[in-house]
Image (spheres, rainbow, N blue to C red):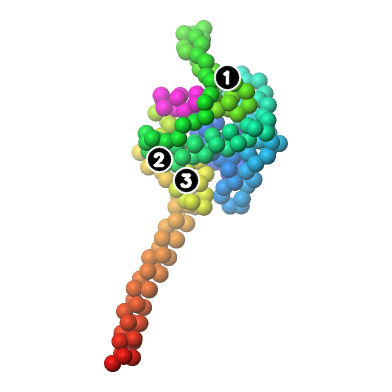
Amino acid sequence: MGWPATDRYELPHAPGGLGLVQDVLNTRSIQQPRMPDLLADLEDAQSWVDGVVGAWSLETGLRQERVPLREADLDRLRDLRVDLNTLVGHGDQNHGGPILPSSSVSARLAPDGRVVLEPRGEGSRRVGAMVLIEMFTAQSLDTWRRLKVCRNDRCRVSFYDRSRNNSGVWHDARVCGNAINLRASRARKRERELGVAQPARQAVESGDHS
């Protein structure tokens, strides 16, 4: 079982349960061709939640029951997505960002002596609790800073940066990087052409008045 939103874009998954956070971000309608927003209506949102809860259970070993959603959960999930996009999309995740919706997390001592965090609540609150657990875990493992949003405004998919120095800004440098560089090159060419045309025009106008 994979992460349904991220799999739509054929992207590699973030490691472990961090794939959940990546998947929340990738529920948006992004890239070309446009994919549907998976949080647009209750039916699609429920199907997505069923998928990610199952994937998260497999990745973490924390078995979760089905999480039923209500209409009121849709706005909360979309708000969660917006807040996560602000946090991840800035690159500097230490800045003062939005406050994520309140969620309940419990801690218990496992038989092997490890402290295990478990989500609590219903509907969107349960999903939010899983997200908080994964944020805490990723920050502890120093993998949180590698979860990013593609810098190409026409793309904006969430990807996990596996570069050695964590310098990636595009989900695919050959696709989005080349597209951005091509647009920048064309913009510079237009500026040069305008820069040459403007003095010539001024010279003509000056000659007309002499």
Disc 2 is placed on an element classified as loop
Q: Earlier in the sequence, mark 1 or mark 2?
A: 2
Give the extent of the magenta segment. Answer: 132-141
Viewer-nearest of discs 3 and 1: 1
CB contact under 8 Å: marks 3 and 2? no
Other residues around mark 3 within 10 Å, as few (<14) / some (14–19) / many (≥20) = many
Could you tell me how many numbered marks the image carries?
Answer: 3
The vertical placement of 16 against 114, above or below, is below
Query: Observer-nearest residue: 82 or 23?
Result: 82
The vertical placement of 193 against 34, above or below, is below
Is 25 left, or right, of 46 in this rendering?
left
Magenta stretch contains residue 4? no
Distance between the alpha carbons at the discs numbered 3 and 1: 32 Å
Q: Residue furthest right?
A: 43
Q: Earlier in the sequence, mark 3 or mark 2?
A: 2
Q: Which residue in the structure is indicated by mark 3?
A: 150
Is 35 left, or right, of 14 in this rendering?
right
**Residue type for callout 3:** Cys
Query: Observer-nearest residue: 95 or 149?
Result: 95
Marking on residue 57: none
Q: Quadrant of the C terminus?
A: bottom left
Distance between the alpha carbons at the discs numbered 1 and 2: 29 Å
Query: Residue at position x 49%, y 39% from top?
Result: 85
User: Is residue 32 at least partly visible in the picture?
Assistant: yes
User: Is residue 16 at least partly visible in the picture?
Assistant: no
Q: Which residue in the structure is indicated by mark 2?
A: 91
Query: Residue at position x 56%, y 49% from top?
Result: 31
Q: Which residue in the structure is indicated by mark 1?
A: 120
